[in-house]
Image (cartoon, rainbow, N blue to C red):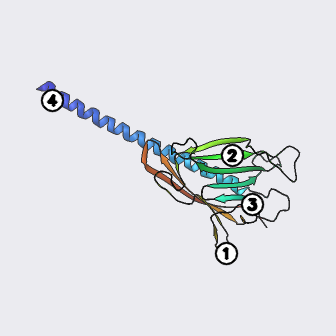
Amino acid sequence: MTIFLLGIITSMAFTFMWSQSNGIEIADDRAKAQSDARFVVELISRELRQAQQRLLGDESGLVEYLDHDTIRFYTDRDADGDPEKVEYYVDDISGTGTFELRRRVWEPDAGSGPSWTYPVTPSTETALAARVLSAPGSSPGYTQQLFAGEEVTTGAVIATCSTPVTCNFDRVRMNLVFEVPATPDFTYEITQTTTFRNPHD
């Protein structure tokens, strides 16, 4: 009987310790996911603040293309005087239903300035975050506009545009939702508005 009771007590103690350990691990996963998400949003925001026209003296907008899960613009990321073309987008890269936030960068063709031209294929492509809830059809059917342009003076919101002329706005609103791999029922949402540092007109 004593052995039986000791077994129950030991089992209960083990279950409690496992539960505590599992809870700490989940909390750590959530904290890391939040930290990673904030880093990614700050990275995008920093590059957006430094956005510039591709052509010197161009009076059109600073963004070349925008829709609900993609934004493309020009910025001198490495401060060498040559503007890179940068695109952030979300897509189901592997076809598994797990969406990734990715960045493409096109370095300008050598000697093409100041009328910069760019290769068709990106110079680099990097996955910045996995398990981003983004586009219509993505699990669990999240349909939030990830990127949107805002015109300060009129208050107009631009959801889609495909040329620097039509993408003529002052700031970009980001709304990104990240899912924690260990706890898929837990999501972390960041909303941030970034105003361009360089004027577009």
The quadrant holding residue 130 is: top right
Q: State how far apart marks 2 and 3 are (Cα).
A: 17 Å
> Between disc 4 and disc 1, whose residue precedes?
4
Circle 3: residue type: Leu
- Give whichever of discs 1 and 2 has the lower sequence position: 2
Q: Which residue is mark 1?
A: 154
Quadrant that contains the C terminus: bottom right
For discs 1 and 2, the disc positioned in front in the rendered view: 2
Q: Position of residue 161 (x, y in %)?
A: 68, 63
From the viewer's perspective, tell me whether residue 57 is left or right of residue 140.
right
Q: Secondary structure at mark 4?
A: helix
User: For the residues marked 3 and 4, what is the alpha-carbon distance in whole angstroms?
Assistant: 72 Å
Q: CB atoms at circles 3 and 4 under 8 Å apart?
A: no
Circle number at residue 104: 2
**Mark 3 Cα within 10 Å, few/some/many (few <14, many 20+)?**
many
Q: Quadrant of the N terminus?
A: top left
Which residue bears the numbered disc 3? 62
Closest to the camera, between mark 3 and mark 4, is 3
Q: Residue furthest left?
A: 1
User: Depth check: 150 or 136 in front?
Assistant: 136
N-term-proximal mark, 4 vs 2: 4
Callout 4 crowding tier (Cα within 10 Å): few <14, some 14–19, many ≥20: few
